[in-house]
Image (cartoon, grey):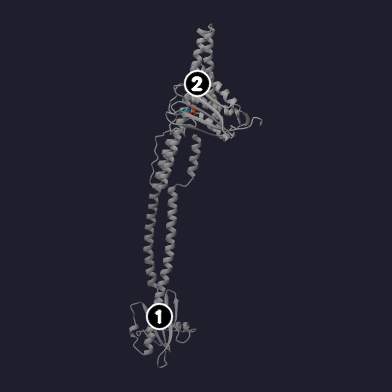
Amino acid sequence: MKSENGLKKNKIKKLKSINSAMWGYFCLFALVLIVLMFSVFSVVTVTTLEDSAKQKIENVGKAVCAQLVSGGDLKQFERREDGVNVYVFSQSSQLLLPENGVAQEDSEAKFNEVQKQLENAEDGQAVIYRDKGTVKYAVEILNGQGESYFVLATYSLFVVHETLSTMLLYMGITCAVALVLALLISYAISQKFTRGLKSMSDTAVNLADGDYSVQFTNVDFAEMAQLSDSLNYVRDEVKKSEDFQHEILANVTHDLKTPLTMIKAYASMIKEISGENKEKREKHLQVIIDEADRLTGLVNDVLSVSKIQANINTIAPKVFNLTELLYSIINKFGYLQETSGYSFMLDIDQNLYTRADSEKISQVFYNLLGNAANYTGEDKTVYISLKQNLDGKRIKFTVRDTGKGISKEDLPEIWNRYYRVDENHSRPVKGTGLGLNIVKVILENHSFDFGVESGAGSGSSFWVDFPSFPAEIG
Ligand code: ADP
């Protein structure tokens, strides 16, 4: 047992704990979420900011063109605060805006760039393009006098990228905090789980060690409460079965002891006192024989149960005279009539045949008659009947006593193995709580109906319903 447990523990060690699994899954979840958020956020922000930058330079470019067409002042477009730079060139590459000018080289480069961009554009059509970290707007425009101008508006995305990286930095910090929080929360939750499971496992170990007072009480979560309930149920059932085992052991040892003591006592008596007195000796020998019979009965009961347990209790049915079989069993109880004042009141139809395993059915009769004799009232009367019904197809066996009867609560239980209604025997009996269980298993194997009618104080009537067969068959 110990080595088995050890093996299991080794296996358990190889498994992942809820704690680490939960940590792992939470981290993975948080990381996937963060990566997803970062990518979506960066793509969306960059495209949105770029679009708005393009919109901005397009608006400024259009305003410059309108001013050129109307011959207005261009000064307002110089040194703008919104970050847009505007350059205006005459047809002959002369820089008109900014008025302060720029380096000659720079001016030429810009003019050439505009020319190049507009190479494939239609007349008056603007081109918006991106050049490294800057978005640009270029267009050629004719004023009322037919003079041609080139306009270039630029907007550096440096600020946009700057803003984006600051935002990403804050987002990163937020995500890191979220990750730490996720870890803490996952730890707290898994702790709650594992604490509950650990305590249940400890309680179960105590139960396995035989402490039936343990209580599974985890009610943190519905599933755990259900598990606790089931384990409490298991505890009750294990205890019941253990109690049964103890009870049967106590019963069997007690019931073995009494006849053995009697046998020893009577044997000694014969040896020392009654050896020479024939009459006394016969009487004492009869007691020894009776007690030996009781012992045999008891051992047979235990053996029958073992056979039933081992499932080797197959039936060998044949047609036989049920009436005769019943008489032969009643005769076995004859000694009760002769020695203890019992009366067996019989109402038995002659020559009734049935098809069954006669040996097993004789055990059914024996157990039911034995119980009736054991539990009947002060009048020591037992009523036995075996009657064929009107259509001749069925035979009903009934054995009735006048004893205390069986209460409603006990009625469904008496057929269970080892079940004994408190110690209410009217006289010493060999009771083991096995007799009725043997009856039940045998009759169920035959698929015969059977039952009991009883109420506290009104005696009990056990019955079995047999199929009727003609004598010739078999
Ligand atoms: P036992 O060997 O104890 O008689 P059984 O399985 O034959 O065991 O019966 C189970 C229990 O049913 C008995 O302990 C007894 O309490 C109750 N019982 C059985 N037959 C009778 C009866 N005829 N009258 C009253 N109680 C009975």
The answer to which image quadrant residue 60 occupies is bottom left
Looking at the image, residue 292 sits to the left or right of residue 239; the answer is right
Dot label at residue 343: 2
Give whichever of discs 1 and 2 has the lower sequence position: 1
Question: Who is closer to the viewer here, 225 or 375?
Answer: 375
Q: Which three-letter amino acid code belongs to the residue tagged 2?
A: Ser
User: Which residue does the image show at 49% across and 37% down from the upper left?
Assistant: 5
* Position of residue 385 measured from the top left corner of the image (x, y, whole percent): 53, 27
Task: Indicate the secondary structure of the residue bearing disc 2.
Answer: strand
Q: Disc 1 and disc 2: Cα gap in Å?
A: 123 Å
Q: Is residue 309 visible?
A: no
* Position of residue 39 measured from the top left corner of the image (x, y, whole percent): 44, 65
User: Which residue does the image show at 45% across and 50% down from the upper left?
Assistant: 21
Q: Which three-letter amino acid code belongs to the residue tagged 1?
A: Glu
Q: Name the residue carrying label 1.
A: 58
Q: Is residue 12 visible?
A: yes
Crowd rating for badge 1 (residues with CA inside 10 Å; few <14, some 14–19, many 20+): many
* Position of residue 245 measured from the top left corner of the image (x, y, whole percent): 47, 29
Q: Quadrant of the C terminus?
A: top right
The answer to which image quadrant residue 421 occupies is top left
Crowd rating for badge 2 (residues with CA inside 10 Å; few <14, some 14–19, many 20+): some
* Position of residue 46 measured from the top left corner of the image (x, y, whole percent): 42, 70
- Number of numbered tags placed on the structure image: 2
